[in-house]
Every structure is written in C-alpha cells, then in structure tokens.
Amino acid sequence: MIQVVVSGAAGRMGREIVRLVLAGDGLALAGAVDRAPGAAGQDAAALAGLPPCGVRIAASLAEALPAAGVVIDFTHFEASAAHAEACAAAGIPMVVGATGFTPAARARVAAAAARIPIVLSPNMSVGVNVLFDLVRQAATTLGDAYDVEIVELHHRRKKDAPSGTAVRLAEVAAAALGRDPARDVTLARQGMIGERPAREIGVQTVRGGDVVGEHTVFFFGEGERLELTHRATSREQFARGAVRAARWIAGRPAGLHDMADVLGLRRGP
C-alpha cells in the first residue's frame, strides 16, 4: 500500500488527485496539505466532493510528511522547490506537477533529486507526453526544411505564460533540430521584425474562457504543413498521470525523472 500525501489538495488538480488516490487499488491517502485560506482543517475527501475520509488538510507539509510514502505536489514552483528539499531531508519520493519554474527553483529540485527519486514534469498527461515523443520524431525527420511554431491555449485564470508544456515542446523540437532554446526560441513578436529567421521556433500564447489546455505544434514546409495537436477536455488526465507517476516512483533510486521515464518513452534528450 502506497501512502500518498497530496500537496495542494484544495486546488482543482489537488481535488482530482485526492479522488483518484481514494479510488485507487494499492493507494491510501495518508495526508493532505494546502496553505489556501480556510483550507486547513477541512476533510480532504469532503472538499473533493466525496464522503469524508478522516484526513484533515494540514497547513504545512511538515505536518503531513511523517505519514508519507510519496508526495504528489501541485502547488507553486517556489513552494514545490521547498517541498522537494523537505522530502529529500526525510527520504520521501516526490512527484511534482507545478509549472513556471525559474532556473534557480529547478536547480533546487534537481539538487534534492540527488538524494531522493523525483518525477518533475510540466504536464502529467499521458497524451501530452506521447505528443512530446511525436514532436521529437517529426522534427528529426523533417529537419531544417520546415519552420516550427507552437500555439498554446488555456483558461483565463492560468498565471504563467507560455505554459510549461509549450516551453517543453519547444525544448524537444530544439534538441531534435540541434538548436539552442535560449537563442532560437521566440516567445513574442511585435512591430517591424523582418523576415523570420530560419532557425527560429515560435511560441504563441492564447488565454480565455475555461479552456483546460490545448497545444498545437506546426511544421510548415513548402507546399504542405504538419500539425500535431493535443486537446485536454478535463483535468482528470493530468491527475491520472500524476498518480501513475507516484506508483512508478515508489522504490526507485534517487534521480530526477520525467513522464518519459514513467511511460518508457525515453529515447534521447
């Protein structure tokens, strides 16, 4: 039985994960954490729309960590980095689904992963991670003759832009094409910018309504184009991926992993 602590349990993703953990074979909800006003003390299952389970939401990870076999964290990247350090000190494996990581915060997670196994992914959806693999294949096969553009759509409440998934898609395409994301990825265009550079990978952001998440990667060639699209219609698939990662990481040695490792898609950078 894997004892799961859900960090960010009062959020939309956290509530989905709580529901799946409570319904999952071989899983037990050992704790729940959320710093949102009014969340502490509430029953985690009741907050997720289920009959009460007796697990009360704690205001800090330190309160719940002693009961944990694995922590699933969907909070803010700064909180996730601090939680990774706490999990490393306690020897508890971790699954991190936060996005918007700064290089410094990601480095803190990577340092913690030298002591414990951590799955860090900007998108836990199985379908999106298959998309990463398809983009790698397409970019490798089509090569420099095709222009790469990425468009991502999300709901109006999303705080980071572009999405972590869009950034990762650009990184995957850049790696396959031998390009440098820091130099060749363009996040915005405005004014008289001139002709499109041949090595450029463009990323465009759209926000509005209740769009759960949509990502399209375009490969524009002469006389044809290829479009690879993933559309999320609910958040449940993200939660399912996170729970799958929690099952996978139990018993693994220390190291920093992503969903490609969880799904057996690892082929390269």
Image (cartoon, rainbow, N blue to C red):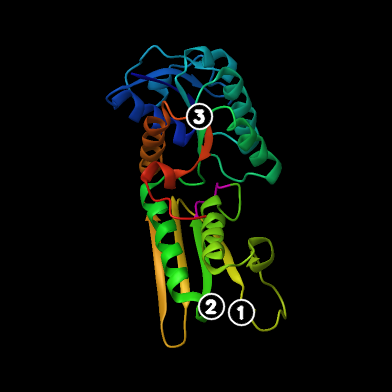
**The one of 180 and 159 positioned closer to us in this rendering:** 180
User: Vertically, is 259 above or below 249?
Assistant: below
Q: Considering only order in the chain, which callout, 2 or 3, is on the residue closer to the N terminus?
A: 3
Along the horizontal axis of the image, is 86 left or right of 10? right
Q: Residue 177, percent across and down?
A: 54, 69
Q: Are marks 3 and 1 in contact (CB under 8 Å)?
A: no
Residue at 48% from the left image edge and 43% from the top image edge: 258
Q: Are marks 2 and 1 in contact (CB under 8 Å)?
A: yes
The kind of residue on which mark 1 rests is Ala
The kind of residue on which mark 2 rests is Asp
Q: What is the magenta range?
A: 154-158
Residue 203 seen by the camera: yes
Q: Please name the residue that numbered disc 2 is placed on.
A: 144
The kind of residue on which mark 3 rests is Met
Q: Please name the residue that numbered disc 1 is placed on.
A: 198
Residue at 57% from the left image edge and 20% from the top image edge: 61
Report crowding for label 2: few under 14, some 14 to 19, many 20 or more residues within 10 A (C-alpha): some
**The one of 123 and 261 positioned closer to us in this rendering:** 261
Report crowding for label 1: few under 14, some 14 to 19, many 20 or more residues within 10 A (C-alpha): few
Q: Considering only order in the chain, which callout, 1 or 3, is on the residue closer to the N terminus?
A: 3
Q: Please name the residue that numbered disc 3 is placed on.
A: 94
Residue that lies at the very extreme toward the bottom in this rendered image: 223
